Image (spheres, helix red, strand yellow):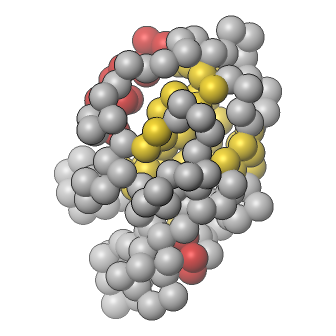
C-alpha cells in the first residue's frame, strides 16, 4: 500500500507538485509512505510516470532507485536538486527532461486530464546496479525480473486551454 499526506489517490496534484513553469507550481515531490512489502523485499524504487503525455512514450517525472528495505517513507521535497532528504544509498535518475530530480506535472494546455502513476516497487535485490545517469526506462527494464510487488497511487492534473 502507498499513501501520501500530499495527494489522495485519484485526486488532482496540489499546486506545489505541479511544474514551476505553471503559475503556483513548485516542483516539490510528494510525501510518500508505504507498507505491506512482500517477504524477501531487499530494496525499493519509486517512479512517477504520465502515460497521457503526447510523446508516444509517456513522460517520466521522477525515478528513485536503491531505497533500502528498512525505509518506508519519503518526506515531501525529497526529490529536490540536492537529494539531501533521500535515504542513504538511494539516488534519483534523470527524468525525461534530463534532470535528476522530481519534475512536477505540466500537461499541455487544453490536452485534457493526465494521470500520474506514483509507484513504489518492492525488489528482491539490494541494489539495481543501474547507473545514476540511466533513464527511468532502463530502471524499469532492470526491475522487471526483480519486482516482488507494487503499490500504486494515481494523481491527476489538467491545464485549461
As displayed, is residue 6 above or below residue 20? above
Horizontally, residue 109 falls left or right of residue 118, namely left
Query: Within the image, what quadrant is residue 72 found in?
Result: top right
x and y percent of residue 62 in the render?
Answer: 43, 50
As displayed, is residue 55 above or below residue 44? below
Quadrant where the image shows the N terminus: top right
Residue at the outermost left position:
56
As displayed, is residue 11 above or below residue 46? below
Please give the name of the residue rendered at 56% of the width and 52% of the height, measured from the top-left corner.
Answer: 84
Please give the name of the residue rendered at 33% of the width and 35% of the height, measured from the top-left corner.
Answer: 132
Horizontally, residue 48 falls left or right of residue 76, namely left
Query: Within the image, what quadrant is residue 124 found in?
Result: top right
Please give the name of the residue rendered at 51% of the width and 88% of the height, measured from the top-left corner.
Answer: 24
Tell which of 152 and 5 is nearer to you: 5
Quadrant where the image shows the C terminus: bottom left
x and y percent of residue 81 in the render?
Answer: 43, 60
Amino acid at each position: 500500500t502507498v499513501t501520501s499526506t500530499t495527494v489522495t489517490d485519484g485526486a488532482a496534484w496540489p499546486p506545489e507538485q505541479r511544474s514551476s513553469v505553471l503559475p503556483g507550481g513548485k516542483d516539490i515531490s510528494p510525501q510518500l509512505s508505504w507498507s505491506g512489502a512482500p517477504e524477501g523485499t531487499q530494496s525499493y524504487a519509486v517512479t512517477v510516470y504520465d502515460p497521457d503525455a503526447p510523446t508516444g512514450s509517456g513522460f517520466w517525472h521522477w525515478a528513485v532507485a536503491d531505497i533500502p528495505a528498512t525505509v518506508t517513507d519519503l518526506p515531501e521535497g525529497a526529490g529536490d536538486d540536492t537529494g539531501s532528504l533521500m535515504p542513504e544509498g538511494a539516488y534519483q535518475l534523470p527524468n525525461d527532461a534530463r534532470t535528476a530530480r522530481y519534475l512536477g506535472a505540466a500537461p499541455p494546455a487544453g490536452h485534457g486530464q493526465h494521470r500520474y502513476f506514483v509507484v513504489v516497487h518492492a525488489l528482491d535485490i539490494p541494489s539495481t546496479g543501474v547507473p545514476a545517469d540511466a533513464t527511468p526506462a532502463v530502471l524499469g527494464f532492470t526491475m522487471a525480473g526483480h519486482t516482488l510487488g507494487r503499490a500504486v497511487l494515481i494523481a491527476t492534473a489538467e491545464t485549461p486551454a
